[in-house]
Image (cartoon, rainbow, N blue to C red):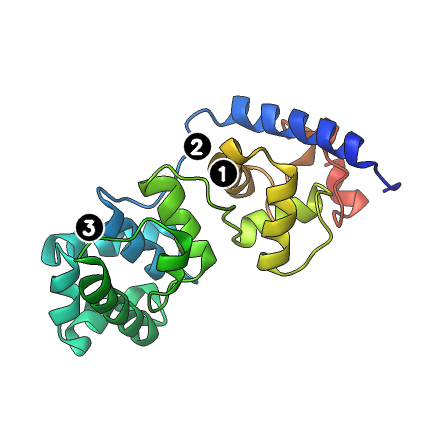
Amino acid sequence: MPRETDAAKANRLKSIIAGLKKTYPGARCELNFSNPLQLLIATILSAQCTDKRVNLVTAELFGKHRSATDYAKAGLTELEQDIKSTGFFRNKAKSIKACCQAIIEKHGGQVPRTMEELVALGGVGRKTANVVLGNAFDMNAGVVVDTHVTRLSQRLGLTKEKTPEKIEQMLMKLVPRKQWTMFSHWLIWHGRRRCFARNPECPTCEIKAFCPRIGVPSSERNK
């Protein structure tokens, strides 16, 4: 792809956003939750696990544990069994307990509303904090960068960065702040429904006119 000016990339991004917004008007976080604590727990469980599996697990988990105190007091072995099918359950159980203990001790049992306070909790990084702030509190503090956002932002030629931290910083510069949360949802929905890692549906893609298809073999572009 020829070198693109910042102005050209900004205009192309506007078209990408418009196309994704039109294609996925109902885009949202696909983890089920009814309060900030539930979303925090669900997001911790979603690491290396599908949202569908997490939702199956939390359907029972949220009925069993209703507060940070419930998780903090839960036996570690019992909690591990409750979340076992999400994978990496031992580490996730420890993170949940440590996180909820800190919420009780430092935040009166309520999930904090700032990036600094959230990432200070056990097992919570920027991605998890961005999910909670953007979807539970409607605050655009950053851009959620998961595997779909990483892959599509590179395929769309929006960044050459490789790490989530650097990709997020680049996207925060390009995307209007008021759209940070939704931009992640739009890319994630597109990655799950059209722009697959293998065999992306380029010919029927709604934003193909604005995508350089970086890394997509020519044989796949025209199928």
Mark 1 surroundings within 10 Å by alpha-carbon count, few (fewer than 14), some (14 through 19), many (20 or more): many
The residue that label 3 is drawn on is 59
Q: Which mark is residue 139?
A: none
Query: Residue at the spot x=40%, y=48% of the render?
Result: 131
The image quarter in which residue 97 lies: bottom left
Tell me what residue is drawn at x 60 percent, y 23 percent: 18
In this rendering, would 153 be left or right of 116? Answer: right
Residue 166 drawn at (x, y percent): 63, 56
Residue 222's x, y, as percent? 76, 35
CA separation in Å, label 3 and label 2: 21 Å
Which of pointers 3 and 1 lies earlier in the amino acid sequence?
A: 3
| Residue visible at 16% across and 53% down in the picture | 62
Q: Which comes before the other along the chain, label 3 or label 2?
A: 2
Marks 1,2: beta carbons within 8 A: yes
- Tell which circle, 1 or 2, labels the residue nearer the N-terminal end: 2
From what the image shows, is residue 82 above or below residue 112? below
Residue type for callout 3: Ala
- In space, the residues marked 3 and 1 are separated at their CA atoms by 22 Å
Horizontal arrangement in the rendering, residue 121 relative to residue 143 (left or right): left
Residue neighbourhood size for the residue with mark 2, other residues' Cα within 10 Å, grouped as few (<14), some (14–19), many (≥20)? some
In the image, which is nearer the foreground, mark 3 or mark 2?
2
Kindly tell me whether residue 151 is visible in this rendering. Answer: yes
**Tags 3 and 1 touching, CB below 8 Å:** no
Q: Amino acid at mark 2?
A: Ala
Helix, strand or loop at mark 2? loop
Q: Amino acid at mark 1?
A: Trp
> Quarter of the image holding residue 213?
top right
Q: Which mark is residue 27?
A: 2
Could you tell me which residue is drawn at 55 percent across and 37 percent down?
190
Disc on res. 189: 1
Disc 3 on helix, strand or loop?
Answer: helix
